[in-house]
Image (cartoon, rainbow, N blue to C red):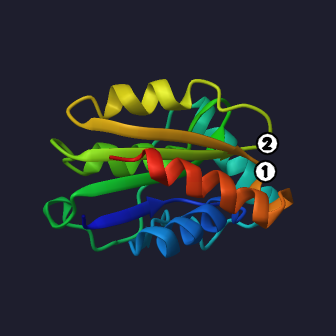
Amino acid sequence: MKTIIVYYTFEGNCTIIAKMLESILNAKTLRIKTKADQKRKKAGGFFWGLSQMFFNRKPVLAPYDFNVNDWDMIILGMPVWAGDPVPAMQSFIKNTNISGKKIALFCTHAGSAGSTMETLKAMLSENTIVGEIDFNSPKKSNPDDLQKIIDEWVKTLK
């Protein structure tokens, strides 16, 4: 099954998970970025991200190469901001006509996934969600423990 992992990361937590999945599944990864990512670092990026969430703005994405028809399964990964999927991933989903695909979802957070999975399922309702998982602060987690969790999750994806 041809699989791609499309993810957005701000602090690197999603990169850790995406790279582990890439290795296990022999998948391709695509890291999406916003046009503003280059300009915003640390605290400035944090406040920019909060403003995106609270004012319900969807950022413009930097150019990327993605053809939905090339993939059997798409794994989407993102951080949780203010209890919801990061705006960059919402922009990606809105701008990409994903339908009739097997979709797996992962998110990273520092407390709770909030309503992230429910929001994503509603946005991707024309697809089959084959799995979902959330990770609390992967950068602070034991890599061996993370690997075991991911290995078990991958076994459930159909």
Q: What residue do we see at 86% from left, 58% from top?
A: 140
Q: Position of residue 77 (x, y in %)?
A: 51, 52
Above or below — where is 94 with respect to 14? above
Q: Position of residue 151 (x, y in %)?
A: 57, 58
Q: Look at label 2 and name its amino acid.
A: Ala
Disc 1 secondary structure class = loop
First-in-chain label (2 vs 1): 2
Q: Quadrant of the N terminus?
A: bottom left
Which disc number belongs to residue 110?
A: 2
Disc 1 crowd, CA 10 A, few/some/many (<14, 14-19, 20+): some
Q: Quadrant of residue 148?
A: bottom right
Q: What residue do we see at 61% from left, 67% from top?
A: 15
Q: Position of residue 134 (x, y in %)?
A: 62, 41
Cα distance in 3D space between marks 2 and 1:
5 Å
Left or right side of 122 for 148: right
Q: What residue do we see at 68% from left, 40% from top?
A: 50
Q: What residue do we see at 40% from left, 46% from top?
A: 104
Disc 1: which residue: 137
Disc 2 secondary structure class = loop
Between 108 and 46, the residue placed more toward the observer is: 108
Above or below — where is 152 with respect to 134? below
Between 70 and 157, the residue placed more toward the observer is: 157
Between 12 and 101, the residue placed more toward the observer is: 101
Asked whether the beta carbons under mark 2 and mark 1 sit within 8 Å of each other, the answer is: yes
Report the label total.
2
Disc 2 crowd, CA 10 A, few/some/many (<14, 14-19, 20+): few
Above or below — where is 73 with respect to 114? below
Q: Look at label 1 and name its amino acid.
A: Ser
